[in-house]
Image (cartoon, rainbow, N blue to C red):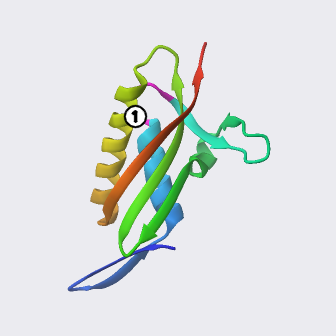
Amino acid sequence: MPAKMTNVYGGMAVSDEAIAKIAAVEATHCIGVVGMAFRSKADKLASLLKKDSASKGVHVSAVNGDVSLEIHVIAEYGVNLSAISSNIAENVKYAVESMVGCTIKKVDVHVEGVRVD
């Protein structure tokens, strides 16, 4: 369901895919993030997504203009997972709220794996 907002000039609906793309781009720009992850329900394994399909690592749910996001990432080995999770949540919330104009109710960050070089 797209996020819907209204103001004095009229209404606007932003698709979940557009919000997911904004969130994915912002999350991948955070330090310590290798990329977005996609968890397969069949085999319960997480896999790294390519840049063009990074939005599949974000689940968007919008109810009455309040948007909730679930972001799945793969982190670099040796980084503080708590610090990068809160950094991702803050940056994504700010980016989506400033670009789309909707209210972000919550951002859940799931670290699906750690990449060791």
Query: What residue do we see at 36% from left, 47% from top?
Result: 92
* On-image quarter of the C terminus: top right
On the rendered structure, is 74 left or right of 91? right
Task: Tell me the element at label 1.
Answer: helix
Q: Which residues are magenta?
A: 29-33
Query: What residue do we see at 49% from left, 50% from top?
Result: 70
On the rendered structure, is 88 left or right of 52? left
- For this rendering, which residue is in front, 111 or 18? 111
Label count reads 1
Query: What residue do we see at 39% from left, 49% from top?
Result: 107
From the image, tell me which residue sits under label 1: 85
Query: What residue do we see at 30% from left, 58% from top?
Result: 97
Q: Residue furthest right?
A: 42
User: Residue 15, position in %: x, y?
Assistant: 49, 69
Is disc 1 surrounded by few (<14), some (14 to 19) or many (20+) residues within 10 Å?
many
Specify the quadrant of the image occupied by residue 64: bottom left
User: Residue 58, position in %: x, y?
Assistant: 53, 51
Indicate yes or no whether the magenta region holds residue 31: yes
User: Residue 33, position in %: x, y?
Assistant: 48, 29
Amino acid of disc 1: Ser
Above or below, 36 against 11 in this view is: above
Main secondary-structure element of the magenta-colored stretch? loop
Indicate yes or no whether the magenta region holds residue 117: no
Q: Residue furthest left?
A: 8
User: Residue 57, position in %: x, y?
Assistant: 57, 47
